[in-house]
């Protein structure tokens, strides 16, 4: 399934403990329909080399809504073709 939310898009969490938070999409896992958002669901993990490490966890695609789409290369290419014509 093709997802409308892509890496770099701005989204808002609509359900769960992080409801109302906005952030930029860092990663998308299309197979599991999960996305990683900057500053949302921050988890603390321990590693032997670095000690305590904080990183964002994945949340389900259905728990967010798109606020602003990522500026893609397709739109830029389309604009350049219009200018040259």
Image: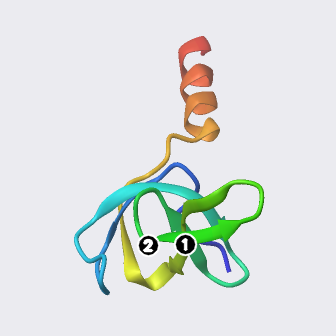
Q: Which of the numbered marks, if any, corresponds to residue 41? A: 2
* Residue 62 picture location, percent across and down: 45, 84
Against 59, is 23 above or below? Answer: above
Q: Is residue 15 above or below residue 84?
A: below
Residue identifier under label 1: 57
User: Is residue 22 toward the left or the right of residue 69 in the image?
Assistant: left
Dot 2 crowding, Cα within 10 Å, few <14, some 14–19, many 20+: some
Front position in the image: 71 or 51: 51
> Residue at the location (31% across, 60% down)?
22
Taking 9 as reference, is 15 above or below it? Answer: below
Can you say which quadrant of the picture contains the C terminus? top right
Tell me the SS state at disc 1: loop
- Residue 32 sits in quarter: bottom right
Tell me which residue sits at (76%, 63%) in the image.
Answer: 48
Q: What is the CA distance from the residue labelled 1 to the residue labelled 2?
A: 5 Å
Q: Which of 9/26 is in front?
A: 26
Q: How is the image coloured?
A: rainbow
Q: Is residue 67 left or right of residue 35?
A: left
Label 1 close to label 2 by CB (< 8 Å): yes
Q: Farthest residue in the left direction?
A: 20
């Amino acid at each position: 399934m093709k997802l409308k939310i892509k890496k770099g898009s701005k989204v808002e969490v609509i359900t769960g403990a992080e409801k109302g938070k906005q952030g930029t999409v860092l990663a998308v896992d299309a197979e599991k329909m999960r996305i990683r958002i900057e500053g949302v669901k921050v988890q603390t993990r321990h590693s032997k080399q670095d000690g305590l490490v904080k990183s964002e966890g994945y949340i389900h695609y259905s728990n967010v809504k798109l606020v602003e789409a990522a500026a893609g290369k397709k739109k830029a290419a389309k604009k350049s073709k219009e200018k040259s014509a």
